[in-house]
Image: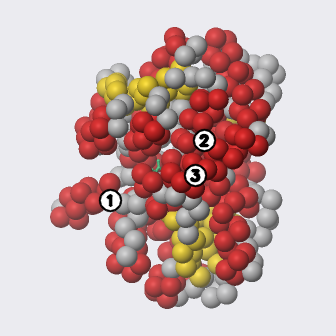
Amino acid sequence: MSHEQFDEGYFGEFGGSFIPPELQEVMNYLSAQFYKYKEDPEFNEELRYYLREYVGRENPLTFAQQITDAWGGAKVYLKREDLNHTGAHKINNVVGQILLAKRMGVKRVIAETGAGQHGVATATACAMFKMECVIYMGSEDMRRQALNVFRMELLGATVVAVDKGQGRLKDAVDEALNDLVQNYQNTFYLLGSAVGPHPFPSMVKHFQSIISEESKRQILEKEGRLPDAVIACVGGGSNAIGAFAHYLDESSVRLIGVEPEQAPTLTEGVPSIIHGFKCLVLLDEQGNPKPTYSIAAGLDYPGIGPEHSHLKVSGRAEYYAVSNEEVLAAFQELSRTEGIIPALESAHAVAYAKKLAPTMGKDQIIIINLSGRGDKDVEQVFHMLKK
Ligand SMILES: *Cc1c(COP(=O)(O)O)cnc(C)c1O
């Protein structure tokens, strides 16, 4: 597929759509439907209804007094995606895409999942909207996340084990794409992060932008001014792009993405094509996507959304990597000081904020996007701390 054929969905040199023609037709149709319903007042009213009544939005922007005092610099606010139904930001996007699938008259939803969080969110909404639900998951990830597999099954989904490759997220994505090519007439592929071919990165961003739409309104109400920095963890990049979206044009607001030292896609990746789109990718010496091993399964992906790749190259956003030790310390510190156990993914953002806050003035403001809650990680952290 050449760059010229599909000029939609580019962020600088990144993004686009590098897929077989039969899949491109599916994407073109999806794109047309998304851009149509995105502007449809009835669709948007229905979306708002479910975000309010089912997801539990809007969620608070909590002033973290204890952690602000402990760090001794900028005022720290937490955007509480951890309080959403199913415990993370992923449900925002899932509800949006399922409502779109419903409008398109589709009854079968497929998805791939790594940590299991996106699978659980998808299975949850499929139960409520009476959709058949098939979740592809790497066999190694299924072992690491056995309880999430059980959750999905409880919710009525079929979980398909993928043994190919390393039995990880990347391999599950390949299988889900195969399914879509074969079953596109009755199947909606519900992608969980701001990755994949056009229109997914733009669509996922749209549905996750509710995060910064709310946080901007909330911080203006509470402080009468914009924050100086917004910090979010990046796996594929959906919570971060949602947390950044309404600040992209506010040049006074630093946008900071935080990734694991074991999966430093943005700090060390090179432009390449993965899963049908162009982005920064971690490659090994042979030029293949490099295996990543984050303690936070949700951040374990060798690629990154195309818009983040562009924000990095253009300099609008900054990206930093933190170590497992820093993440574990942040996980415990937020639990102890604020009584909020963060997801290990979100603890990456907290860990970087801990370094940044003391370098800032007491009149300055940081918003940390708390992408999810840590209940799912407590057992893992228990074992890591006991060692
Ligand atoms: C999945 C997940 C992430 C990483 O995904 P993004 O698309 O980068 O947001 C981060 N935090 C939590 C809690 C997650 O479940």
The quarter of the picture where the N terminus appears is top right
Residue at the image position 67 percent from the left and 87 percent from the top? 363
Would you say 60 lies left or right of 169 here? right
- Tell me the kind of residue under disc 1: Asp
The quarter of the picture where the C terminus appears is bottom left
Mark 1 or 3, nearer chain start: 3
Residue designated by label 1: 375
Residue at the image position 39 percent from the left and 52 percent from the top? 296
Would you say 302 lies left or right of 293 here? right
Q: Which mark is residue 96?
A: 2
| Percent position of residue 88, x then y | 47, 54
Residue at the image position 61 percent from the left and 50 percent from the top? 49
Pointer 2 local density, CA inside 10 Å: few below 14, some 14–19, many at least 20:
many
Q: Nearer the viewer, mark 1 or mark 3?
A: 3
Q: Which mark is residue 80?
A: none
Residue designated by label 3: 51
Residue 33 in view, yes or no = yes
Marks 3,2: beta carbons within 8 A: no
Which picture quadrant has residue 248?
A: bottom right
Foreground of the two, 66 or 31: 31
**Which residue sits furthest left?**
386
In space, the residues marked 3 and 2 are separated at their CA atoms by 9 Å
Foreground of the two, 86 or 357: 86
In space, the residues marked 2 and 1 are separated at their CA atoms by 25 Å
Q: Is residue 378 above or below residue 17?
A: below
Element type at marker 3?
Answer: helix
| Percent position of residue 215, x then y | 65, 66
Marks 2,1: beta carbons within 8 A: no
| Percent position of residue 257, x then y | 59, 58
